[in-house]
Image (spheres, rainbow, N blue to C red):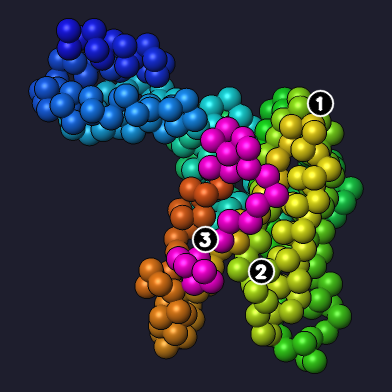
């Protein structure tokens, strides 16, 4: 009876390499059965992916299954299996975290950065460890023609584009009266125009396949503004409006567009701030901590996956409740 129960799990959730069957012979199985059985009747179709992965991870953990006992990390089905993602500005920071998370969930990843240096090569190696296709492309995202060339090359290399994350961005802060035209133009070009460039280049392919998820990396300052960052705030607010407009234009083609607005995220840039400044920021956050790049990557994964198939035109603030 116990074997039949878990063979049903294996069949329903499509475990590969008889992983569920292998677990049956391991100690602690009776405990696992009693831990999970009460919940099975509450599963819903919209939560099948998460349910499957929670059950499998719990079984492996409680039964003492080591990762090396699986043939490969890619043997575990993920939320993004079979999808191809482009992540701009992904050699480091939030972009890198998103690229890694996407790969861990089964996606093949093409990412861009201004130059492909040692940091980018390291990102490639980390993504390759998940057993999925990855390639890095040097690209000036603010250049319209160059962006189209890169996207065409990605299509040639990967065959399709399912997900686009517009993450490339810079800051050149200063009080408005002291801000130069060059400061304003540089930030708007990299942060906002680059997103237009990549959306413009990717949309035709997404239209042909009648599906696609576009994610613009905005910021809480794009929602609320911030002194000394009028250029950055304007660019991030523009990303929100851009996603909403694309969502309205392309919804009938099965293409969704959303924005993520991170708050105070713990990155090398914020870690370099004076301790008193960091303390002031954290005291404004109800959760009393800075966010992590993984917090952002998790939300991006939700928006990229079919779990959010009825979500478009939204702005998700990931800020620990700082602006609730």
Which quadrant would residue 26 be assigned to in this image?
top left
Q: Secondary structure at mark 1?
A: helix
Residue at the limit of the structure toward the right, as seen here:
145
Q: Nearer the viewer, mark 1 or mark 3?
A: 3
Q: Whole-percent x and y of residue 206? A: 77, 32
Q: Are marks 1 and 3 in contact (CB under 8 Å)?
A: no
Residue at the limit of the structure toward the front, as seen here:
42
Indicate left or right for 107 with 242 as reference: left
> Which stretch is magenta?
301-324
Asked if residue 68 shows in the view, the reply is no
Residue 98 located within the stretch drawn in magenta: no
Q: Whole-percent x and y of residue 207? A: 81, 31
Q: Nearer the viewer, residue 210 or 123?
A: 210
Query: Which label was assigned to residue 208?
Result: 1
Near mark 2 (Cα within 10 A), the count class, few <14, some 14-19 or many ≥20, is some
Q: Could you tell which of marks 1 and 3 lies nearer the N-terminus?
A: 1
Query: Which label was assigned to residue 318?
Result: 3
Q: Are marks 1 and 2 in contact (CB under 8 Å)?
A: no
């Amino acid at each position: 009876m116990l074997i039949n129960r878990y063979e049903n799990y294996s069949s329903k959730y499509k475990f590969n390499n008889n992983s569920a069957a292998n677990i049956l012979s391991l100690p602690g199985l009776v405990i696992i059965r009693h831990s999970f059985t009460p919940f099975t009747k509450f599963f819903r179709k919209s939560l099948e992916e998460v349910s499957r992965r929670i059950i499998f991870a719990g079984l492996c953990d409680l039964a003492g299954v080591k990762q090396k006992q699986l043939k490969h990390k890619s043997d575990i089905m993920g939320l993004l299996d079979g999808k191809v993602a482009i992540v701009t500005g992904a050699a480091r920071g939030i972009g890198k975290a998103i690229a890694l998370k996407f790969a861990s969930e089964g996606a093949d990843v093409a990412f861009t950065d201004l130059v492909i240096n040692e940091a980018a090569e390291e990102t490639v190696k980390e993504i390759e460890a998940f057993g999925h296709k990855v390639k890095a492309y040097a690209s000036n995202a603010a250049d319209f023609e160059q962006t189209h060339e890169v996207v065409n090359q990605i299509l040639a290399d990967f065959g399709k584009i399912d997900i686009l994350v517009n993450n490339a961005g810079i800051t050149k802060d200063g009080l408005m009266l002291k801000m130069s035209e060059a400061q304003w133009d540089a930030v708007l070009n990299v942060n906002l125009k680059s997103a237009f460039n990549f959306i413009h280049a990717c949309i035709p392919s997404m239209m042909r396949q009648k599906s696609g998820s576009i994610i613009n990396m905005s910021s809480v300052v794009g929602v609320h503004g911030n002194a000394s960052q009028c250029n950055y705030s304007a660019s991030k607010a523009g990303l929100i409006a851009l996603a909403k407009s694309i969502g309205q234009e392309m919804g009938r083609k099965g293409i969704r567009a959303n924005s993520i607005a991170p708050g105070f995220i713990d990155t090398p840039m914020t870690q370099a701030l004076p301790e008193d400044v960091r303390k002031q920021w954290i005291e404004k956050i109800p959760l009393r901590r800075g966010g992590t790049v993984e917090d952002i990557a998790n939300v991006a994964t939700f928006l990229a996956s079919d779990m959010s198939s009825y979500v478009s035109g939204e702005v998700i603030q990931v800020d620990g409740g700082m602006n609730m």
